[in-house]
Image (tube, rainbow, N blue to C red):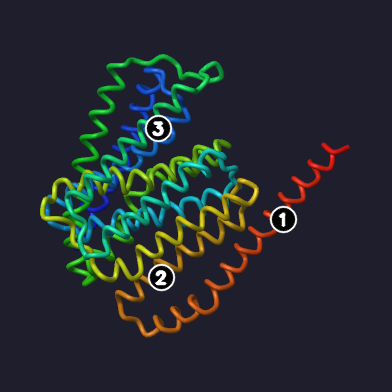
Amino acid sequence: MLSTIIWFIIGLISLVGGAELLVRSVSKLAVQFGISKLIIGLTVVAFGTSAPELAVSIQAGIDGQTDLMLGNIVGSNISNIFFILGIAAIIMPMKVNAKLIRVDVPLMIGVTILLFLFALNGSITFWECLIFVFLCGFYLMFLIRENSKTNFSNEKLPLKSSRNLNILGSLAGLAFLLLGARWLVESAVVFAEIVGISQLIIGLTVVSFGTSLPEVATSVAAALKGERDIAVGSVIGSNISNILVVLGISGLFIPEGISVQNVLLRFDLLILIAASVACIPIFFTGHKISRWEGGMFFFLYISYVTYLFLSAAEHAALEMFSGAMLFFVIPILTVTILTVSYREWKRRQRFKGFGKTNEEK
């Protein structure tokens, strides 16, 4: 048991350290090749912080641990929205770039719903994973086109560094990722068997939280530095890449398809869709995530994890907890979000009316 925990921790440290090294090195290379910082945030940083999920998912797929793979992807996306955005907003209320609201958030919702539709028949096929990869290609082409429109005159480039050193750092980061993924997956499977918890629950909680640590570090650091667009953009970009890149590429290593448990369809994927859709009204209210909204996200994540462990343990408090969430907490939060959204909409309508009145004068 002790050796399993030690290897799990070593694997986790290797994943986080490898991701940090990979993101730093590739980000410097991207700037050296003339790529906008905004695009770097949505691609290099977002995809880079998703590298642990990709490494773990590929390793799990090769080992036939598809429950661990899907649990890692779905759990990471839920963690990204509820936990990471929640913590970052509690530390510092964050402004949300209008482009994210118009393009990237709807895309995140769209690919999440597409994942649910693909999973309805109980399996995600090789060809459906290939569709995700093609969608990722189109998304990258769109970002490249946006990059070509960017004015670099205001871009502050980093100090010159060796291109060869950055390439070496990228390769070293990738090596740490692959080794960490192997150690983490193997120890997580053993840990699940010892404790008696399913691989799906382990993937949805322990593994997904561990592989989300790069996003936690990136978003919290960005929030503390006042880089609030980066904090939000990296999370949204990471959620998109987790489905299109991580699931898409991992599924190509499993020709027979990825089996989907019914509980994932009935609960966890629905929670992920709800979390994604919840971003629209919250981001819409003043184009920001306030502290109370961050607190609400954080509370929902704690509630979600609590439910998973109560359910796995078949605890007597599960029924009371579920009833309280279903009939009391969730309705109050829903009404609160709708009320705030309606007030914001009325405020904007009054502002438009005031502008028209001034034009008439």
Q: Specify few, some or many for label 3: CA neighbours under 10 Å numbering under 14, 14-19, or 20 or more.
A: few
What residue is disc 1 on? 346
Q: Specify few, some or many for label 2: CA neighbours under 10 Å numbering under 14, 14-19, or 20 or more.
A: some
Give coordinates of residue 343: x percent, y percent: 70, 58
Q: Which quadrant, please, contains the N terminus? A: bottom left
**Is residue 227 depicted above or below 101 in this figure?**
above
View extreme (right): residue:
361
Label 2 or label 3, whichever lies nearer to me, is 3
Q: Are marks 2 and 3 in contact (CB under 8 Å)?
A: no
Image quadrant of residue 46? top left
Q: Are marks 1 and 2 in contact (CB under 8 Å)?
A: no
Amino acid type, residue under disc 3 in the picture = Phe
Amino acid type, residue under disc 1 in the picture = Lys
**Front one among 361 and 72:** 361
Give coordinates of residue 114: x percent, y percent: 33, 54
Please tell me which residue is depicted at 22% across the width and 48% down the height of the picture.
129
Q: CA distance from mark 2 to mark 3?
A: 39 Å
Please tell me which residue is depicted at 52% across the width and 79% down the height of the picture.
327
Q: CA distance from mark 1 to mark 2?
A: 37 Å
Residue 142: image tag: 3
Q: Specify few, some or many for label 1: CA neighbours under 10 Å numbering under 14, 14-19, or 20 or more.
A: few
